[in-house]
Image (cartoon, rainbow, N blue to C red):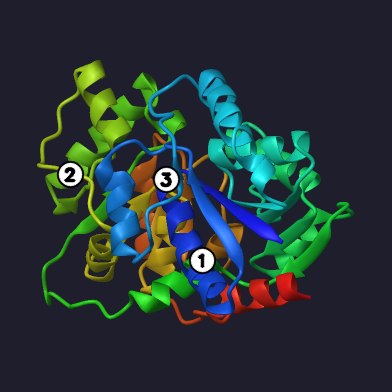
Amino acid sequence: MRYLHIVGARPQFMKLAPLVKEFDNQGLDFDVLHTGQHYDDSMSSDFFNELDMKPPKFQFDNNNKPYPTMISDMITDISSVINNYTDVIVYGDTITTLAGALSSTFCGKKLHHIEAGVRCKNLEMPEEKIRRLVDEASNYLYCLTERDKDNLGHVGGEVYVVGDLMYENFLKHSNIADIGQESYIFVTIHREENTREKELTSIIGQLNELSRKRNIIFPIHPRTRSCIKKYGLKLEFEPLDAISYNEVLFYIKNCDFVISDSGGVPKEAYWLGKKSVVVLEGLVYPILEEEKCSVRSDYDNILESLEKLEELPEIENFNLFGDGKTSKKIVEILNG
């Protein structure tokens, strides 16, 4: 068996890191392909270095393209090398995930989907459609939880509950310094639907209002920075440039609360005992809201959602996403 791991975005790098280490430990034959979906060093090569991974064997450039062009070019790139492999491994729910799944299907390769069965039940979100399409195409599906397995229904592939590779990666980076009494809210905003003019104008207005009362740490995604400039918006506080994974964890650990439209950041906040406002039309991980770790917010009522968040009790259950041994479980399945 020869495996091709296909990644292209920050959360996928964090899922990839523990799994390729276990592949190395067990002597499995594999390579990594980076589609170039995330498009500057702070969002890409710096993460590989920080996570102690070798540079990917294949590195393409698909940054800042319209989505139809991006996925077409990704499929062309992946298809140029895929026939050297028997199996393809994709992660999560990005354009890269879909391009890898389609390439695998067209070229007759076995497809493995890491983080299968995640559902927010909102088909207006492109990520939700990608999850469903990739799950239907997959030969092997690796779920975070029993709930995600139940979401799959009667798919054709083999289904396993293995826990969360992000949690395993988090545990290896969780020795984080405490800065004491400084008080601030940690914010990340990057999704396409939140960086359209109407939505981003409202979000920045609310963050400016919040900044008059609370300190804000806002590492700004390249897409968000570009859109703020494009729409002529003004921040009343100084954002940070994109930051490293360890810096993300540091700022989350020491914050009061998190506001984010990320899938991964609210999980990282949960593992660090911090509650989060999730600015999405549908939660990626509804279990976080059910366990009173997160509050979902529309783009135009973030401040009201933050008030609700402050009323929630402290987090007590930290075992929602497995035991931190996911990579070993996946490799055991592959070794049969």
Q: What residue type is labelled 2?
A: Asp
Looking at the rendered structure, the secondary structure element under dot 2 is: loop
Estimate how packed mark 1 is, as few (under 14), some (14 to 19) or many (20 or more) residues with alpha carbons within 10 Å.
Answer: many
Looking at the rendered structure, the secondary structure element under dot 3 is: loop
Whether 229 is drawn above or below 205: the answer is above
Identity of the residue drawn at 46% across and 30% down: 193
Which residue is disc 1 drawn over?
Answer: 20
Q: Where is residue 194 in the image (x, y as percent from the top left)?
A: 41, 32
Identity of the residue drawn at 40% across and 57% down: 265
| Numbered circles on residues, count | 3
The mark closer to the camera, 2 or 3, is: 2
On the picture, is 4 further left or further right than 212? right
What is the spatial separation of the Cα atoms under label 2 and label 3, in whole angstroms?
17 Å
Which residue is disc 3 drawn over?
Answer: 261
What is the spatial separation of the Cα atoms under label 2 and label 1, in whole angstroms?
29 Å
* Mark 3 or mark 1, earlier in chain: 1
Q: Nearer the viewer, residue 178 or 131?
A: 131
Q: Which amino acid does label 1 sit on?
A: Val
What is the spatial separation of the Cα atoms under label 3 and label 1, in whole angstroms?
27 Å
Q: Furthest-front residue in view?
A: 84
Image quarter of the N terminus: bottom right
The mark closer to the camera, 3 or 1, is: 1
Q: Which amino acid does label 3 sit on?
A: Asp
Which residue is disc 2 drawn over?
Answer: 241
Residue 16 seen in the current view: yes
